[in-house]
Image (cartoon, helix red, strand yellow):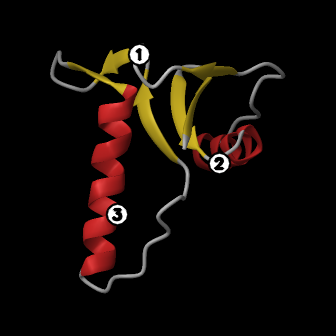
Amino acid sequence: MEAYRIGDHIVAADTEEDARHFYKEEVGKEAPAEIEELSVSLEVPAGEGQTATIRDLMNKVMDERCAWLRMGVPCELHWPFIIAKLK
């Protein structure tokens, strides 16, 4: 998965097209014409005044999804998700 900055959100998705579609469905706005692909090494807000790399936050969500799969709960492993919201 890759990370894309769309407005004030950072979205993880397999492709830019997936990120745009997810952003429109989840946030309810059209994505701007230009969106930025971010390095997974970039540090972003992680709540409670903490920061973490995009890679760490992506891995956390993927680990949670894998845990659901191991428990037999259907889960789309590569479904896009919001990594962080920037202020």
Question: Compared with residue 42, is residue 16 higher up or lower down, i.e. above or below?
Answer: below
Mark 2 vs mark 1: in front: 1
- Under mark 2, the amino acid is Phe
Question: Compared with residue 28, is residue 42 higher up or lower down, i.e. above or below?
Answer: above
- Under mark 3, the amino acid is Arg
Question: Compared with residue 65, is residue 23 higher up or lower down, i.e. above or below?
Answer: above
* Residue 27 location (% of width, % of height): 59, 40
* Residue 22 location (% of width, % of height): 65, 48
Q: Residue 54's image quarter?
A: top left
* Residue sitting at the far bottom: 72
* Residue sitting at the far right: 33
Cα distance between the residues tagged 2 and 1: 21 Å
Q: Residue at x 45, y 25 (%)?
A: 40
Please report whichever mark, 3 or 1, sits nearer to the chain's N-terminal start: 1
Split into 4 quadrants, where in the image is the N terminus?
A: top right
Mark 1 lies on residue: 42
Q: Total of numbered circles in the picture? A: 3
- Judge from the rendering whether residue 65 lies leftward or rightward of residue 25; answer left or right: left
Disc number for residue 65: 3
* Residue 15 location (% of width, % of height): 70, 43
- Judge from the rendering whether residue 11 lies leftward or rightward of residue 65; answer left or right: right
Q: Residue at x 40, y 29 (%)?
A: 84
- Under mark 1, the amino acid is Leu
Seen from the viewer's position, the closer of residues 23 and 73 is 73
* Residue 8 location (% of width, % of height): 54, 20
Please report whichever mark, 2 or 1, sits nearer to the chain's N-terminal start: 2
Split into 4 quadrants, where in the image is the C terminus?
A: top left
Mark 2 lies on residue: 22
Q: Which residue is drawn at 33% across and 50% down?
A: 61
Cα distance between the residues tagged 3 and 1: 23 Å
In terms of secondary structure, where does tag 1 sit? loop
In terms of secondary structure, where does tag 2 sit? helix
